[in-house]
Image (cartoon, rainbow, N blue to C red):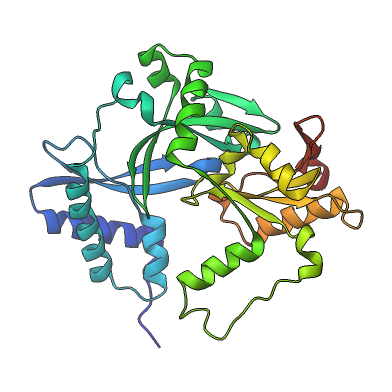
Amino acid sequence: MGKQRETYQAFCEIIVNRIEEQFAQDAIVQVNTVVKNNEVVYDALNIIVEGEKISPNFYLQQYYESYKTGDSIEEIVVAIAEAYYRSLEEREKINFNLDFASCKERIVFRLVSFSRNKRIASKVPYLPFMDMMVTFHIVMQQTKEELGSVRITREIAKKWNVDTEQLFELARQNTPRLFPVKICTMYAMMTEMMEENVNEWEGFSITPNLTEAKQEPYVVTNTMGINGAAVILYQNVLEKIADRLKGDYYILPSSIHEVLAIPMQQDLSQEELAQMVWEVNATCVPKEEILSGSVYCYDSKAHKIELCFNEQEICG
């Protein structure tokens, strides 16, 4: 029998104590509650060092999962300490000044669920979009692998003396520049994943069915693959997809990171598509990354997106 793992609460207490020992008298170590997208609550460990403007969040639930699968307390403490010191190095390159002049070219929008973020909606400026909402964020750090941002609250917007429409106009210009659109077939996306993970995909191949090529779904996201569902708000993107698909199409919200564009077919009803989305959300998508359970339609002649099957109809 292996050594019994500590409970989550005991694990958190041990990690806090060990991090305090690691940093001795140089820092205050505390745990704060952080509300993420879809109001998923995390316990964030912060290391507060005198003279530093900001502390990274170390989400204890995530470290607990790695602990349960075999990582030792010592390995986790070392990982947190190393990540903290790396953040210090990165911080030197980042401007954490939150005045409007410093931030206005880094204001971007995201597309999130409205029904799953009602508490957040009461604290932030937003614009409704179908049964979703557009929220605004400041990009603080952007590398090929990582993205750091700050959500714009009503308090920040008031301090800046800007309204929601002004935020949207800035984000409409900045978001496509910082996060260019990426549209590709499902086959191309799978091929790219295979090329990036050759060892994991060894012996596996995908052969496109050329007779169904015109019906193949398109993956719509951004080049970073993070919060990419918002690209459907970019100017002319929906029209370009209609050109590729030669007409009207469905939009399925895969997650906050991407959507799928599927040509309208007689053999797939809106109810069946909604059921597919519901099942994927329930089994494959982390709660924090669910965008919607609805199905949307794009009318290529009217140049208009519509809600064609509301997730409430399938959820009751």
The answer to whether residue 106 is above or below residue 73 is: above
Number of numbered callouts drawn: 0
- In the rendered image, residue 59, in percent from the top left (x then y), is placed at 37, 52
Q: Is residue 208 left or right of residue 288?
A: right
- In the rendered image, residue 101, in percent from the top left (x then y), is placed at 30, 19
Nearer-the-camera pick, 175 or 7: 175
Q: Among all residues in the image, which is located at the extreme bottom?
A: 1
Nearer-the-camera pick, 255 or 260: 260
Q: Residue at x 38, y 48 (%)?
A: 43
Q: Residue at x 59, y 44 (%)?
A: 229
Nearer-the-camera pick, 91 or 72: 91
The answer to whether residue 176 is above or below residue 285 is: above
Quadrant in the picture for the N terminus: bottom left
Q: Among all residues in the image, which is located at the extreme right?
A: 266
State whether residue 57 appears in this view: yes
Quadrant in the picture for the C terminus: top right
Which quarter of the figure has residue 307? Answer: top right
- In the rendered image, residue 238, in percent from the top left (x then y), is placed at 68, 38
Nearer-the-camera pick, 90 or 1: 90
Which quarter of the figure has residue 285? Answer: bottom right
The answer to whether residue 141 is above or below residue 205 is: above
Q: Among all residues in the image, which is located at the extreme top?
A: 161
Q: Is residue 92 left or right of residue 210?
A: left
Q: Residue at x 20, y 54 (%)?
A: 86
Q: Is residue 48 left or right of residue 192?
A: left
Q: Is residue 155 left or right of residue 229?
A: left
- In the rendered image, residue 143, in percent from the top left (x then y), is placed at 34, 49
State whether residue 257 appears in this view: no
Q: Residue at x 59, y 82 (%)?
A: 204
The answer to whether residue 282 is above or below residue 166 is: below
